[in-house]
């Protein structure tokens, strides 16, 4: 059964890479009380991702998959307990937070990056890209430890047909880094902006922001063109020209400007609410990514879920395409020394509930 699930995931990711149906958008916010929030979406319009939240106690043992779909790779013993959100099967955690205050997230990176080839003699140091988040959350307390751990490991793919990915790591100090595997070698980038999407690479995305140096918050002032007076049609004309499509470079630019122009909120919870509001702008409706009549899945949205992680207070918030109510998991209320491993679907009912208004 596991082999079937992994094969389906690899095929899904292959389709994703070929059709450019992938999209993830990440932002970062800091509240006036110094709380640090990382928020992100995950999109995939090809099929339902069957996402779950997983709770992993200290001491929990997992093994990495290796090519051939066997659990013969790195032994991963959780030094830190963590909560994560998975896709397709519970082992594939793509976003999470551990009890030490380290956040980790996987973002699709199709057409760019290259992992090293699997070497069976190095299997005990080999971890698949889809399990890197789990390994890091169980092993590291901050981004410096992430860099040290990855340098000693071999990051591989389960299936060479699948898309490559890149990762975002952030800790309680406010430091954030991006990891991309280029030519089989790990490359780390300090992410002072706190934005991440997909392809091309992070350095290219940062350089591309220079093309939008003319944008600013607010409304352009009226002026004369010769003897003719011209003025803005409405508010927000300082952003005229900001790209509005769903491609990764355009989403990166929009996320950067929406994040940096948003007013700083007083508290962590206010910043979390703001993060969800900003990311509303990145929801991708079903139908946008595929040619007319070729929509492969009957799901309500390509944006399957959105999360906001309060690193400072150790809380994960999420909502889904089936239920826009924001739910929260407070890590401070979990005894990671006593709790058992569990994996639970994000939604028990896969349909947006309506709340009746009682008119007396």
Image (spheres, rainbow, N blue to C red):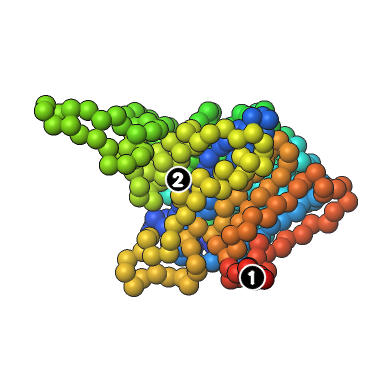
**Towards the viewer: 126 or 249:** 249
Which residue: 53% across, 51% down? 41
Between 40 and 226, the one nearer to me in the picture: 226
For marks 1 and 2, the one nearer the N-term is 2
Q: Is residue 167 visible?
A: no
Residue occupying image coordinates x 53% and y 34%: 263
Picture coordinates of residue 95 (x, y %)? Answer: 62, 48
Residue at 43% x, 36% y is 257
The percent coordinates of residue 195 (x first, y second) are 50, 37
- In the image, 99 versus 326, the foreground residue is 326
> Mark 2 falls on what kind of element?
loop
- The residue carrying mark 1 is 359
Q: Is residue 100 left or right of residue 339?
A: left
Relative height, residue 174 to residue 139 (above, below): above
Tag shown at residue 301: none
Q: Which residue is mark 2?
A: 198
Query: Which quadrant of the figure contains the C terminus?
Result: bottom right
Q: Quadrant of the N terminus?
A: bottom right
Residue 306 shows in the view: yes
How crowded is the residue under tag 2: few (<14 C-alpha within 10 Å), some, or many (20+)? many
Residue 332 location in percent, x, y?
80, 44
| Mark nearer the viewer, 1 or 2 | 1
Q: Residues within 10 Å of mark 1 (few under 14, many from 20)?
A: few
């Amino acid at each position: 059964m596991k082999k079937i699930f992994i094969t389906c995931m690899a095929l899904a990711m292959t389709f994703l890479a070929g059709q450019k149906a992938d999209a993830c958008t990440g932002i970062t916010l800091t509240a006036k009380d110094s709380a640090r929030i990382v928020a992100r979406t995950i999109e995939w319009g090809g099929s339902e991702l069957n996402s779950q939240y997983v709770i992993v106690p200290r001491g929990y043992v997992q093994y990495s998959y290796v090519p051939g779909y066997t659990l013969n790779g790195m032994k991963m013993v959780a030094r830190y307990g963590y909560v994560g959100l998975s896709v397709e099967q519970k082992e594939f955690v793509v976003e999470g937070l551990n009890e030490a205050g380290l956040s980790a997230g996987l973002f699709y990176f199709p057409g760019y990056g290259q992992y090293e080839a699997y070497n069976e003699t190095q299997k005990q140091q080999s971890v698949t890209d889809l399990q890197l988040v789990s390994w890091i959350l169980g092993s590291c307390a901050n981004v410096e430890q992430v860099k040290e751990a990855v340098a000693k490991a071999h990051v591989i793919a389960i299936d060479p047909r699948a898309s490559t990915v890149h990762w975002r790591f952030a800790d309680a100090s406010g430091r954030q880094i991006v990891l991309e595997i280029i030519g089989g070698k790990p490359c780390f980038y300090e992410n002072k902006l706190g934005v991440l999407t997909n392809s091309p690479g992070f350095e290219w995305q940062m350089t591309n922001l220079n093309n939008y140096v003319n944008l600013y918050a607010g409304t352009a002032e009226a002026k004369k063109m010769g003897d003719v007076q011209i003025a803005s049609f409405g508010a927000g004309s300082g952003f005229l020209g900001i790209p509005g499509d769903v491609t990764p470079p355009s989403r990166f630019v929009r996320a950067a400007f929406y994040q940096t122009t948003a007013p700083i909120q007083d508290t962590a919870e206010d910043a979390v609410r703001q993060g969800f509001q900003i990311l509303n702008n990145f929801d991708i409706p079903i139908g946008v990514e595929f040619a007319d009549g070729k929509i492969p899945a009957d799901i309500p949205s390509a944006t399957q879920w959105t999360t906001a992680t309060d690193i400072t207070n150790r809380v994960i918030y999420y909502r889904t395409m089936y239920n826009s109510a924001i739910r929260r998991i407070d890590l401070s209320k979990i005894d990671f020394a006593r709790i058992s491993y569990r994996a639970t679907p994000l939604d028990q009912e896969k349909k947006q509930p309506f709340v009746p208004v009682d008119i007396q």
